[in-house]
Image (spheres, rainbow, N blue to C red):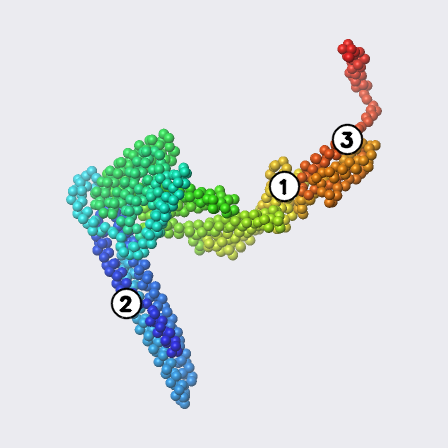
C-alpha cells in the first residue's frame, strides 16, 4: 500500500498545472469582457450588418477551442482522481471487514499495528486526492461559467441577427425621393460613420491561432500552383484548352490555391473577407475574361466585380445606411441598363439560356430599384448583395468545372499513368467517372457557399457541414448526403478494384498458359460479381441498413421472384453454373441445335453472347446451354477430325481411288500424321461407289480452309487419273398418256423434224 501511495503522489504531481490553467482562463474572460459593449453598440447601429454580426459571433466561438484546451485536461484529471478515490474507499472497506474478523480481545499487537498503518496510508491517500480535487473542481466550475458567458454572447448575437432577418420583410421606411431620406443624408451620415468606425472588426489573435494553418495552406498551395504553371508553361501554351492558364499564371494560382480550401474556414474576419473578394475576384475575372471573347460580357464581369468589392468595402468600414442605399440604387440602374442591352444582343446569336440569364438579371435589378425607391431598403440590400455573390460563386464553380475536367484528362493521359494497365485499358471510363465525382464535389461546395450567401449558414465550414449532413429519416435510420456519398464511393471502389483484378488475371501469361483464356475470363467474371456484391453490402452497411432485415426481406421477395421472374432466375443460376462448371468457355466453338457454328464471346449472368461465322451476334439464354444439348468442338482441346465423303463411277478401280485419297491427305501440310489419315471403301450407292477420307487437324480454326482445299485436290487427282465422279441418272418409263397430249406433242415436233430434214443452203454449204 505504501508503494501504491507513492505512485498516487507521482500521478498527482504530474497532473495539470492549475495556476497555468487559471491564467489561460482569465485571458479568455478578458477577451470576452470586450464584447458586451460592442453588442450594445451593434443594437443601435442601423443597417443590416450581417458581416459584423457573423464576424463577432465567429470570433467569440473561437474561444471555445481555447476553453476546451482547459476543460479536457481538467476533466481527465478529475476522472482519474475520482477513480483513484473509489479504489481507496473500496480498499478502506476491505480493511474494515478484515479488522472486524481478525481483531479480537486477545489479538497480537503486530496485527493491530498493521491495521493502524493501513488505515493511516488510506487516510493519507484520500486526503491527497481530496486536496487535489478541490482546486480542480473549482476551476472546472469557473470554466462552466465562462462557457455560459460564451453561449450567452452568441445567443445575443443570434437574437440580433434574427431581429435583422425579420426586418427583411417589407419595411416601410423613408423612400429615397423624400425629404425624410434627404434629412438622413444631411444630418445622420457623419455621426453614423464615426460610430461605424468604432466597431470595425479586425482579425483577433485567436483567429490566427485556430485558423492560421488554413491561411498558411492557402498561401503554400498558391505558390506551388504558380511554380508548376511556370515550369510547364511551354506545354500549356501549346494546348488550346490551357493557354489561358499559362498566360495568367498568378490569377490561376490564386484560384487553384485559395478557394479549394476556403470551405475549411469556420471564421472569416471582415478584413480577410474583403481581401478574398478583391484578390480572388480579380483573378476570377481575369481567367473568365480569357474564355469569354465577347467585349460586352467582359465589361459586365468587371462591373459585377466592382459592385461586389465596393459593397464589401462599405460593409468593412460600416458605411452609413443612407449612403449604402444610394450606392445600391445607382448600381442597380447601371446593372439594369447593362443586362437589358446584353439580353437584346444575346437574343440574336447566343443560346437561350444566356439570354434568359441576362433578362433574369435585368428583372432582379429592376426589383431592387423599385424596392429602394418605395422605401424597402433592407430587403433590397439583402437581395442585391446575395444575388451578386451568388452569381460570383456560380461563375467560380463553372471555372473550376472547366479546370477540373481538363486536369482529369491530363492526369489519366499522362505517360506515367498510361504505363498502368488498368488506366491504359479504361482511360475514357476513368476520365468520365472521375470527372463526374469531381463535378459533384465542386457542385456541393458551390451550393454550400450559395446557402451561406443567403444566410442559411453563418460560415463556409458550417455551410459545407450543413450540406453534407442534410438528409432524411427512414424509420430509426437517418440517411444523410455524406452517407450517400460514402456508399457511392465504396460501390465505385469495388468496381475499380474488380477492373484492376480482372486486368491482372487476363494479362498474367502464366495463368493463361495454365487455365486458358476461357478459364481466365470465367475467373475474372466471378471476381467482378463477388467484389461488386461485397461493395453493395458495404454501401448498405454505411447507409445504416441492417443486413439481417435485408436477408429477411430478400427471403420474402424470393418467393415472389421465384414465381414472377422464374425464367430470369433460372438463367441467373445457369450463368453461375456456366462460370463454375465451365462446360463452355470464352473462345470455344460450339454447334447449336440448328446446326449453326459460333464462337463464345462473353458469358453473362443472364445470357451468353456468341458470334456466328456470318459475323452475327446471338444472345443465348444460359438455361438453353445447360438444359439442352450443345456440341462444344473445343472443350478439351482444339484437335479436330475431318470426314470427306467421295463418290466415283461404277467400274472405277477401288484400290487406285484409295491410293489417290491417301496421297492427297499425306501431301497436305495441315493434316497431322498422328493419328494417321485413312481412307476406306464405305459401300455401293445408287449411282456411285462411295469412299470416305478421314484426316485430323491440330487447330479447329483451319477446318473450312483445309476442308475446301482437300476437296479441290481430290477432284484434280481423280480427273487426272481419268476417274469419273458420277451424277444421278434416271430412266423414265411412260405407261399411259392422253391422246390429246400426244397429238399436241406430235404437232410441236413436226416443224423441228422438217427443219432437220431440209437444212438451209448455208448450212448445206457448210
**Which residue is drawn at the image coordinates 20% and 51% (left, top)?**
198
Query: Badge 1 is on which residue?
Result: 599
Secondary structure of the residue carrying tag 3 is helix
Indicate left or right for 220 with 663 as reference.
Answer: left
Query: Between disc 1 and disc 3, whose residue precedes?
Result: 1
Badge number at residue 720: 3
Q: Position of residue 647 (x, y in %)?
A: 78, 34
Query: Badge 2 is on which residue?
Result: 19
Indicate left or right for 470 with 751 as reference.
Answer: left
**Which residue is drawn at the image coordinates 63% and 38% (left, top)?**
612
In the displayed structure, 294 sits above or below 154; it is above
Q: Position of residue 149 (x, y in %)?
A: 27, 60
Q: Position of residue 582 (x, y in %)?
A: 63, 49
Indicate the quadrant where residue 661 lies: top right
Indicate left or right for 224 with 678 as reference.
Answer: left
Q: Nearer the viewer, mark 1 or mark 3?
A: 3
Amino acid at each position: 500500500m505504501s508503494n501504491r501511495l507513492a505512485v498516487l503522489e507521482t500521478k498527482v504531481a504530474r497532473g495539470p498545472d492549475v495556476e497555468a490553467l487559471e491564467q489561460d482562463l482569465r485571458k479568455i474572460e478578458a477577451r470576452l469582457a470586450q464584447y458586451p459593449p460592442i453588442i450594445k453598440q451593434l443594437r443601435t447601429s442601423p443597417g443590416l450588418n450581417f458581416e459584423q454580426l457573423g464576424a463577432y459571433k465567429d470570433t467569440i466561438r473561437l474561444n471555445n477551442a481555447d476553453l476546451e484546451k482547459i476543460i479536457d485536461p481538467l476533466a481527465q484529471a478529475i476522472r482519474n482522481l475520482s477513480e483513484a478515490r473509489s479504489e481507496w474507499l473500496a480498499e478502506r472497506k476491505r480493511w474494515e471487514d478484515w479488522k472486524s474478523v481478525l481483531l479480537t480481545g486477545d489479538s497480537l499487537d503486530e496485527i493491530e499495528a498493521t491495521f493502524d498503518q493501513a488505515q493511516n496510508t488510506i487516510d493519507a491517500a484520500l486526503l491527497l486526492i481530496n486536496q487535489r480535487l478541490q482546486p480542480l473542481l473549482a476551476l472546472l466550475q469557473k470554466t462552466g461559467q465562462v462557457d455560459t458567458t460564451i453561449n450567452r454572447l452568441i445567443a445575443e448575437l443570434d437574437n440580433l441577427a434574427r431581429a435583422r432577418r425579420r426586418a427583411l420583410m417589407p419595411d416601410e421606411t423613408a423612400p429615397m425621393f423624400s425629404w425624410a431620406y434627404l434629412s438622413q443624408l444631411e444630418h445622420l451620415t457623419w455621426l453614423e460613420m464615426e460610430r461605424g468606425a468604432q466597431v470595425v472588426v479586425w482579425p483577433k489573435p485567436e483567429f490566427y491561432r485556430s485558423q492560421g494553418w488554413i491561411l498558411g495552406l492557402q498561401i503554400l498551395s498558391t505558390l506551388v500552383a504558380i511554380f508548376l504553371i511556370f515550369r510547364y508553361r511551354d506545354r500549356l501554351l501549346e494546348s488550346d484548352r490551357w493557354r489561358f492558364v499559362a498566360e495568367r499564371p498568378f490569377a490561376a494560382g490564386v484560384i487553384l490555391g485559395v478557394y479549394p480550401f476556403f470551405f475549411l474556414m469556420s471564421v472569416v474576419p471582415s478584413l480577410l473577407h474583403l481581401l478574398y473578394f478583391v484578390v480572388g475576384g480579380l483573378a476570377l475575372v481575369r481567367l473568365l475574361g480569357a474564355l469569354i471573347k465577347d467585349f460586352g460580357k467582359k465589361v459586365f464581369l468587371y462591373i459585377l466585380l466592382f459592385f461586389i468589392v465596393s459593397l464589401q468595402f462599405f460593409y468593412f468600414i460600416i458605411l452609413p445606411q443612407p449612403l449604402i442605399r444610394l450606392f445600391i440604387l445607382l448600381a442597380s440602374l447601371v446593372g439594369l441598363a447593362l443586362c437589358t442591352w446584353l439580353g437584346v444582343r444575346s437574343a440574336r446569336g447566343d443560346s437561350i439560356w444566356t439570354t434568359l440569364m441576362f433578362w433574369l438579371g435585368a428583372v432582379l435589378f429592376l426589383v431592387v430599384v423599385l424596392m429602394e425607391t418605395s422605401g424597402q431598403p433592407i430587403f433590397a440590400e439583402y437581395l442585391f448583395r446575395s444575388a451578386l455573390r451568388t452569381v460570383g460563386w456560380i461563375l467560380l464553380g463553372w471555372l473550376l468545372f472547366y479546370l477540373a475536367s481538363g486536369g482529369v484528362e491530363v492526369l489519366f493521359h499522362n505517360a506515367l499513368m498510361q504505363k498502368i494497365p488498368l488506366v491504359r485499358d479504361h482511360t475514357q471510363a476513368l476520365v468520365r467517372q472521375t470527372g463526374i465525382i469531381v463535378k459533384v464535389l465542386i457542385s456541393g461546395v458551390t451550393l454550400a457557399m450559395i446557402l451561406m450567401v443567403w444566410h442559411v449558414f453563418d460560415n463556409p465550414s458550417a455551410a459545407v457541414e450543413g450540406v453534407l449532413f442534410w438528409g432524411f429519416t427512414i424509420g430509426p435510420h437517418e440517411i444523410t448526403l455524406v452517407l450517400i456519398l460514402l456508399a457511392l464511393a465504396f460501390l465505385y471502389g469495388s468496381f475499380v478494384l474488380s477492373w484492376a483484378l480482372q486486368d491482372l488475371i487476363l494479362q498474367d501469361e502464366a495463368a493463361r498458359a495454365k487455365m486458358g483464356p476461357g478459364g481466365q475470363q470465367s475467373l475474372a467474371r466471378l471476381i467482378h460479381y463477388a467484389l461488386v456484391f461485397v461493395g453493395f453490402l458495404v454501401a448498405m452497411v454505411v447507409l445504416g441498413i441492417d443486413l439481417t432485415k435485408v436477408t429477411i426481406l430478400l427471403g420474402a421477395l424470393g418467393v415472389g421472384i421465384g414465381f414472377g421472374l422464374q425464367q430470369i432466375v433460372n438463367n441467373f443460376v445457369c450463368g453461375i453454373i456456366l462460370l463454375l462448371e465451365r462446360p463452355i468457355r470464352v473462345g470455344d466453338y460450339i454447334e447449336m441445335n440448328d446446326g449453326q457454328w459460333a464462337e463464345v464471346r462473353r458469358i453473362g449472368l443472364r445470357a451468353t453472347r456468341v458470334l456466328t461465322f456470318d459475323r452475327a451476334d446471338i444472345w443465348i439464354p444460359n438455361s438453353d446451354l445447360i438444359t439442352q444439348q450443345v456440341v462444344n468442338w473445343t472443350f478439351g482441346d482444339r484437335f479436330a477430325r475431318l470426314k470427306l465423303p467421295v463418290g466415283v463411277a461404277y467400274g472405277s478401280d477401288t484400290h487406285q481411288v484409295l491410293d489417290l485419297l491417301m496421297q492427297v491427305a499425306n501431301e497436305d501440310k495441315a493434316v497431322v500424321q498422328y493419328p494417321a489419315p485413312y481412307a476406306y471403301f464405305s459401300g455401293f450407292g445408287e449411282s456411285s461407289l462411295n469412299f470416305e477420307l478421314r484426316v485430323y487437324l491440330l487447330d479447329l480454326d483451319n477446318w473450312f480452309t483445309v476442308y475446301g482445299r482437300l476437296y479441290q485436290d481430290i477432284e484434280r487427282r481423280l480427273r487426272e487419273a481419268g476417274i469419273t465422279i458420277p451424277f444421278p441418272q434416271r430412266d423414265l418409263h411412260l405407261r399411259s398418256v392422253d391422246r390429246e397430249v400426244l397429238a399436241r406433242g406430235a404437232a410441236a415436233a413436226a416443224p423441228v423434224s422438217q427443219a432437220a430434214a431440209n437444212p438451209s443452203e448455208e448450212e448445206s454449204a457448210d
